[in-house]
Amino acid sequence: MTGFVLTLALWSALGANAPRENRRGLDALAKGDTAKALKHLEKAAKADTADARYAYNLGTVQARTRKASPDAALGQALSHAKSPQERARILYNRGTSRYETAKAKHQASTVPAPGGAAGNQDDNGKNEVDGAISDLRQALKLRPGWNEAARNLDLALRLRSQCNKPKNDDKNKDDKQDRKQDPQPQPQNQMQQQDAQRLLEAAQAQENNQAKKAPQRKKDDDDGPDW
């Protein structure tokens, strides 16, 4: 199943309000008060914008609770991450969040509206799934063989294939059937590095084919730098 890397830490770095607000936010989260947790974590991320850890905590809780989009916070964390491991973890969380958003939008677009018409097909999650694929590919490049990232990338690639189907009644029915039969990722004890590489090559091939069919998209600012 998809999920987030919830390695929230109680750092005691020096600073004005950030460490205190970070600790209060994590304490509230441990007690199940997500609203209070988000409030304190937002203050921590604003108090120290140069420390990736506070923005990472905020974005991860936003992604897990779906109370707000984590893109801004995780983008901030990515721009200040100091190691490949940190960057991979941030990209994995942002990519997984984007996949979940894309999946929800795609499902909503195939649900019949009152009167029998299909849902909002113009916003079927394709933009989010493209971002998810990009993030998860980068995460796997930084951390080859990461089982969860490889499974989520595979799910995102399948979802994009569904998003690209022609928009007509027959295809909408097919999409709903695909949604009912959407395979859940199965646990894997081990994944060889060549298996992760195969998924990366498949993603690259699909990206190249997509680029031939559509104008070059301008890279979003929140995608972060190329590592």
Image (tube, rainbow, N blue to C red):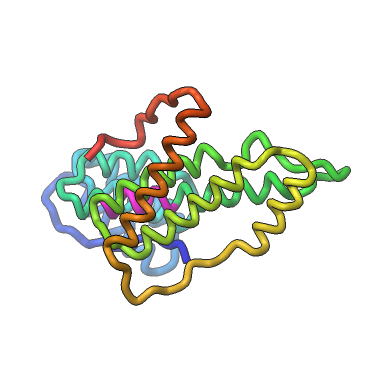
Q: Residue furthest toward the bottom?
A: 189
Q: Quarter-wise, where is residue 154 in the image?
A: bottom left
| Left or right: 115 as drawn, with respect to 46 | right
Residue positioned 38% across, 54% down in the render: 199
Near-viewer residue (64 or 117): 117
Residue positioned 71% across, 47% down in the render: 110
| Left or right: 222 as drawn, with respect to 178 | left
Near-viewer residue (13 or 194): 194
Count of numbered badges drawn on the protein: 0
Q: Which residues are magenta?
A: 88-96
Q: Residue furthest toward the right?
A: 115
Residue 158 in sight in this render: yes
Residue 142: x %, y % from top left: 23, 51
Residue 82 to residue 144: above or below: above
Q: Residue furthest toward the left?
A: 14
Q: Is residue 159 magenta?
A: no
Residue positioned 60% across, 43% down in the render: 163
Q: Quarter-wise, where is residue 189 in the image?
A: bottom left
Residue 47: x %, y % from top left: 24, 41
Residue 113: x %, y % from top left: 80, 45
Near-viewer residue (51 or 83): 83
Residue 115: x %, y % from top left: 88, 43
Residue 70 in sight in this render: no
Q: Give the quadrant of the C terminus.
A: top left
Q: Is residue 90 magenta?
A: yes
Residue positioned 19% across, 39% down in the render: 50
By secondary structure, the bulk of the magenta-drawn segment is best described as helix
| Left or right: 68 as drawn, with respect to 14 | right
